[in-house]
Image (tube, rainbow, N blue to C red):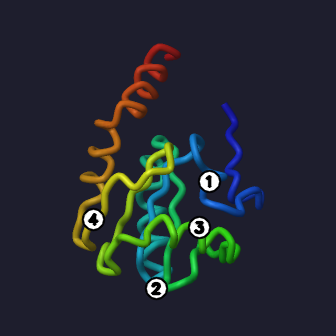
Amino acid sequence: MLTINPIENNQVDHIRDLKWQKRILVINTGDRIETQKLTSFYSEELKDRDFVVIQLNGHEAFFEDTRMSKRFTKSLLKKLKNYDEGDYFILLGKDGGVKNSFTQGTEMRTIFDQVDRMPMRMNEMRRKIDRD
């Protein structure tokens, strides 16, 4: 099945535009190269779990190398207002809610395991098995 990423097609101007479509992993860092390495290395796992990775650098948000709109960034920062700047990864579910935050040393497997235990993800995996 061909899926179109709404961010790549400039259809996202607010965090709610991703609700029920994508999980969001926010990486709170100014290091774009590190973010690119991470997303490249785990590309299949991220795709399988319907993730969009957003890099947050201060008051700017990026998808890949594209700066997100001010409106999108403002909506994201509002969602994350109660989280510490020291949180390196912040996980948002498809329902738009913040699920957890993680420190910089956290293994991606830990994040994937948490997602895989979520009821919506478990349903997705069951449907995938039924199709195959």
Residue 14 picture location, percent across and down: 66, 61
Q: Quadrant of residue 61?
A: bottom right
> Tag 3, which secondary structure?
helix
CA gap, disc 3 and disc 1: 8 Å
Q: Amino acid at mark 2?
A: Gly
Q: Earlier in the sequence, mark 1 or mark 2?
A: 1
Circle 3 is placed at which residue position?
75
Frontmost of labels 3 and 2 is: 3
Q: CA distance from mark 1 to mark 2?
A: 24 Å
* Closer to viewer: mark 1 or mark 2: 1
First in residue order: circle 3 vs circle 1:
1
Residue under the image location 70 percent in, 73 percent down: 69
Which numbered disc covers residue 30?
Answer: 2
The first of marks 3 and 2 along the sequence is 2
Q: Please tell me which residue lies in front, 106 or 75.
A: 75
Do residues under tags 4 and 2 come within 8 Å of each other at their CB atoms?
Answer: no
Q: CA distance from mark 3 to mark 2?
A: 19 Å
Position of 3 relative to 77 (above/below): above
